[in-house]
Image (spheres, rainbow, N blue to C red):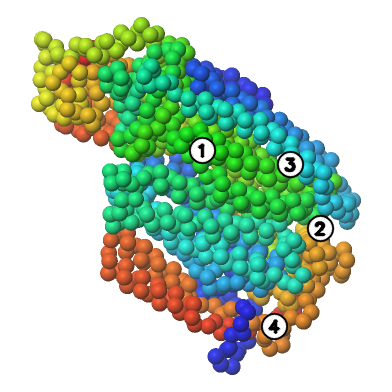
Amino acid sequence: MLLAGGATALAAGTPESEFNPAGPVAALQLSYIELSFWIMAGIFIVVAGVLVFTVIRFRERRGQEKEVPPQVEGNTLLEIVWTIVPILLLAILGVVTVSGSFALADLAPPSKAVVVDVVGHQYWFAYQYTNLGVTTANELHIPVGEKIDLELQSADVMHAWWVPRLGGKIDSVPGRTNYMWIEASKPGIYTGQCAEFCGTGHADMRIVVDAQSPAQFNAWLNAMKHPASVPTSGLAKQGYTDFATAGCDACHSITGTNYTVGVIGPNLTGLANRPMIAGNILPNTPANLAAWLHNPPGVKPGALMPNLHLSPGKIKALVAYLESLK
Amino acid sequence: MAAISKPEAQPHVVEPYEAGKGLWSWLNVVDHKRIAHLYFMASGLFFLTGGSEALLMRIQLFHPNNHFVSAETFNQLFTMHGTTMIFLAVMPLFIAFFNAVVPLMIGARDVAYPRLNALSFWLFLAGGLFLNSSWFLGGAPDAGWFSYAPISTSLYNPGLGIDFYAIGLQIAGIGTLATGVNFLVTILNMRAPGMSLMRLPLFVWTVLVTSVLVILAFPALTVNLFFLMFDRIIGTQFFAVASGGQPLLWANLFWVFGHPEVYILVLPTFGIISEVVSTFSRKPLFGYSTMVLATVSIGFLSFMVWVHHMFTLGYGPWVNSIFALTTMMIAVPTGVKIFNWLATMWGGHIRFSVPMMWVVSFLVTFTIGGMSGVMLAMAPADLQFNDSYFVVAHFHYVMIGGSLFGILAGLYYWFPKITGRMLNETVGKVSFWLVNIGFNVTFFPMHFLGLIGMPRRIYTYAPGLGFTTWNEVATTGAFILGTGFAILVANVIVSLASGPKAVADPWDARTLEWGLPSPVAPYNFSHIPLVRGRDPLWVEKTHGDGRIPAAPGVHEHAPDGTVHMPQPTALPLLMAACITALGYALLYRNLYVAIVAGAVAVYTMHRSMFSPDPGEYMRIAPELETMALEGGAH
């Protein structure tokens, strides 16, 4: 028990700990975890206690080897009691399970809520704000204090979007749309990762959620709709042109440019504002971005972005361009 | 053997000591006890393979961003570890016990279908070797032991790995299905006079229910694997989303099999625990009728809970609630069993030989696994737990702390009966403590890892998330656990060669097999026994002369002093070889070899089914009987 308590106290402080819920979904789930744990712990203490007592009290003593203890065959009353009591305890858990299942399925009405289409890809998540006209990837911005409806889909295999401090996961199943809601109570950065095995890059498919005040969220939306995407001078301008000649626009789109056909790779609008790159496995620095462009599968095993064998000069220009996308 | 087989010529009488000499006798074996030896050896080897795969993974996970193995290799390791441990280690270890013990416990000379029994073993071995040959033939399967579509379809998984998985499990699966049929018929049809169903040892009840589960659950897996094979080999579209195929079809069919499968993997352990706890407490199993009812209930309910593996697949609150409730229901008979085992110990005279030590640790670790199981059953909470290390902790507590600890109790308990030698107690106790300490140090922290956000099936993790320390603890525990197992295996090997010879009844036990010499004669019983109550040997010890009486009026259809036994044959081995060849032919898309192999397999099947087994007459050896009832409590 002591070990469990100590470990739990330590665990509450880790960045993705379910013991530190940041919203009502995670809080409800934690309350169920705690309720079931304590009921189960109670049963365990009884079982372990009886076991320890039995092992000591009824151990065969020296001299008893030839004796036979009373050959008791059973006791109907005991059987009834230790069937009914667990049923009652489980009934408690059953009631809250049913009510909780319905609460977690109670999405906000879509006309009034922020609705995000979360599409799993090998190995990154795309986010489309369906009634707000914004498309992005890898970093999800949400306003605090309101239900966010997530519509979960997949472009290829099964994935699962999991940010433990905000709530559990529902899988992205190709060919269907699944639904869940999340809500952040306080502003902050919340992280997680894909939780349904999806291939070589599964471990490197990570999630960043930026929960912001409504004002900041609207500012972000605005910046995403009117980004500074076309530089006018310098290496960044060279990179803007290289984006097409290197073939990047075949897979990637950027709002505010003519690069609008590429949908199989992440949308790069506002890339410079994102804290991480490559499915959130590397900090967003020029050096890391250059290493990524140099050889994506070398950096992230299984990455479907090919190694285009770009020259160092081209990489420099592209990095300058991408780091200008605010 | 209801019909009398006509011998083809003047029968010669086989000496019981001659049966089973030489390598060839192992290849044309039909004797259930020798088949049990084969199952023990093969599953032991596969267990070590699966364990090595685990240790490699634990090394990789010791540090964040480690590069001990690549992501691709890691994915193959976790897939093969799970597939091997479930299909090639734990399940066959149970089948080894079914073979070693069930006919003896019910007073029979063999199982109902000895040739089919041999075929089951050869198919298990062939399937296991086929699956593991993937390591050397281009790569092992890498989509997990439940191989979800569409990551397992050829669109996302070209290459042969998943074909090895699908075909290999089909080969082994035929064997398992046959075992289920064999033991169901054996237990229903071949009980000695007086052995009514409510006098069956509880282990036999668990084998009976497990056999029913196998027969009802394996076809779902078979169908699913056929769908996958057809998609990958001939281009059907069962799981191809672009053509209207359904990944959820795979998931549902898999778990309709997969959930009963985990009860197949735990019910026999409940049976073993019941036998050992009763013997070593010197009392009958408490609440026998309730235990039978609980076993049957668990078997029945096991088909009603499969969606609890799929709470995150988006079926919604109605479906999730129903299956959460059924899952909680199945905890009730399971808990009842634990209480009855405790009540069996209560008021007894408990001897803590190694088998009983495993029972006590089982009671702790299986209860912990049951606790985490109930926590997982709460569907809203499971949305956090699913696909995290919390689930990994849960199933290792029930699979190792449950299934395997029961197997180890059974191993120490029945080793004398099966081999004629005793396992070393001291070495047994050392490995007991190492395994228990190593097991808990490895898997208890995984509960925390899941609760702080570590998903399953990741080859590495980022620093700074709090995962590192617990992973280091778990890896350390894994090596302690491995050491404990290594010592256990060494105990088995050394004891087989030079352990002290065992008497017939070293534990002063209660069931029929302990009234026979150790090891048992090839024909099991010199006379078909008469069963006069539950715990039949105990009845004879307390109300008779301690010897198993012969059932009167049993006509042996054999010359005096002999018994009619099945004749050894290599047909099962040949059939298994053909089916394996067919498997490789499908794998390499070679139609000609497939047709030839299939034709020979069909021919051997025809021969097996329609050529009568003339049997052979085996001499009953009276010199073995004098040993029969020496010894009481050790």
Q: Chain of mark 1?
A: B
Judging depth in this view, the residue of B475 and B122 nearest the camera is B122
The residue under label 4 is B556
Where residue B112 sits in the image (x, y, percent)?
60, 72
Mark in front: 3 vs 1: 1
Which callout, 1 or 4, points to the residue nearer the camera?
Answer: 1
Tell whether A252 sits left or right of B247. left
Let me know if marks 1 and 2 both belong to one chain: yes
Nearer-the-camera pick, B27 or A227: A227
What residue is pinned by disc 1?
B319
Picture residue at 33% right of the left edge, 56% below the top = B230
Q: Amino acid at mark 1?
A: Val
Regarding residue A299, the answer to whether it shows in the image is yes
Indicate the amino acid at tag 4. Glu
Question: Does mark 4 fall on the same chain as mark 1?
Answer: yes
Secondary structure of the residue carrying numbered label 3: helix
**Vertical position of residue B103 compared to residue B154: above or below:** below
Whole-percent x and y of residue B291?
A: 72, 51
Q: Residue at x 71, y 54 (%)?
A: B292
CA neighbours of label 3 inside 10 A, class few (<14), some (14 to 19), many (20+) = some
What's the residue type where badge 2 is placed? Ala
- Chain hosting mark 2: B
> Between marks 3 and 2, how big is the CA–CA gap?
35 Å
How dense is the environment of label 1, judged by Cα within 10 Å: few (below 14), some, or many (20 and up)?
some
